[in-house]
Image (spheres, rainbow, N blue to C red):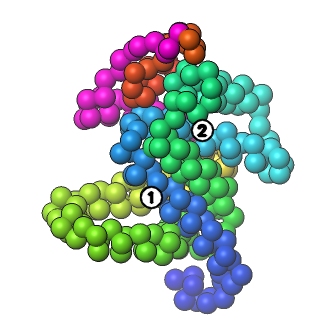
């Protein structure tokens, strides 16, 4: 409605809208689903929970938001724990990383950038309209990859089960999640809103155990490389965060 009444309302903002769609809908959207092939649901949520730290660092560097000492300490602890889990306790960085972990890191950086941009571009329209614009931009970036996959495996892309997955992905982690995140971002700011991602590992741990059977198990890292207890599967990272080692 606002665009109909004022066609030039978003003049000069289209590059920012395209960038927000690229970061939040394309970079954060696609790699997460591909990452799930080689890493676990809990590990994905733990890596995505690093996003508030990136938002915090950028906000502090640019002076956009003030950060309390309690927030700094909490994020430092979260970063240390997440790095320990991602590397699986290995002494050398990168030893315990899977392809899925790296893709999740890329998606996390995209989400951090989107968090910082979502309420700074597309001003003058409602937050639902902004999400629609960002989603349209992200869809354009995703279109070549979607066409390629459909061309390669049309039998997998057009099934009843696939259509249900598309509907669920479009509504639950799509429209509903992005709309709620945009509303919180407009009301509480980028840093405070990004802290809500710390709920992700807890929820993912419960759901993955209930529906995916990703029960936590423990083994020890090679004693020649490290003496840190690590998980035989990254799905147990939430347990490691909650129980002192």
Q: Is residue 72 above or below residue 163?
A: above
Specify whether residue 225 is painted magenta: no
Q: Which residue is the site of mark 2? A: 50
**Tag 1 or tag 2, which sits nearer the N-term?**
1
Q: Residue at x 46, y 25 (%)?
A: 237
Q: Position of residue 205 (x, y in %)?
A: 38, 30
Q: Position of residue 147 (x, y in %)?
A: 36, 75
Numbered disc 2: secondary structure: loop
Numbered disc 1: secondary structure: helix
The quadrant in which residue 116 appears is bottom right
Horizontal side of 76 relative to 185 (left or right) equals right
Q: Which residues are magenta?
A: 195-223
Q: Position of residue 47 (x, y in %)?
A: 53, 38
Measure the C-alpha gap from mark 2 to mark 1: 18 Å
Q: Is residue 71 above or below residue 11?
A: above
Q: Which residue is the site of mark 1? A: 30
Q: Nearer the viewer, residue 240 or 17?
A: 240
Q: Position of residue 36 (x, y in %)?
A: 38, 45
């Amino acid at each position: 409605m606002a665009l109909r009444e004022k066609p030039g309302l978003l003049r000069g903002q289209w590059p920012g809208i395209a960038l927000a769609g690229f970061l939040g809908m394309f970079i954060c959207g696609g790699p997460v689903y591909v990452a799930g092939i080689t890493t676990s649901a809990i590990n994905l949520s733990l890596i995505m929970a690093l996003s508030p730290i990136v938002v915090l660092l950028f906000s502090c560097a640019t002076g956009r938001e003030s950060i309390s000492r309690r927030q700094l300490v909490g994020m430092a602890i979260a970063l240390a724990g997440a790095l320990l889990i991602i590397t699986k306790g290995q002494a050398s960085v990168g030893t315990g990383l899977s392809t899925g972990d790296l893709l999740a890191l890329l998606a996390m950086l995209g989400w951090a950038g989107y968090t910082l941009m979502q309420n700074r571009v597309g001003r003058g329209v409602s937050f639902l309209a902004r999400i629609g614009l960002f989603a349209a931009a992200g869809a354009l970036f995703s279109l070549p990859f979607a066409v390629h996959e459909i061309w390669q495996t049309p039998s997998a892309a057009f099934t009843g089960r696939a259509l249900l997955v598309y509907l669920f992905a479009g509504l639950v982690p799509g429209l509903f999640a992005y709309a709620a995140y945009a509303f919180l971002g407009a009301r509480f700011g980028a840093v405070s809103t990004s802290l809500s991602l710390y709920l992700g590992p807890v929820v993912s741990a419960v759901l993955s155990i209930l529906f995916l059977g990703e029960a936590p198990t423990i083994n020890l890292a090679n004693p020649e490389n490290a003496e840190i207890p690590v998980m035989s599967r990254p799905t147990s990272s939430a347990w490691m965060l909650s129980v002192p080692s």
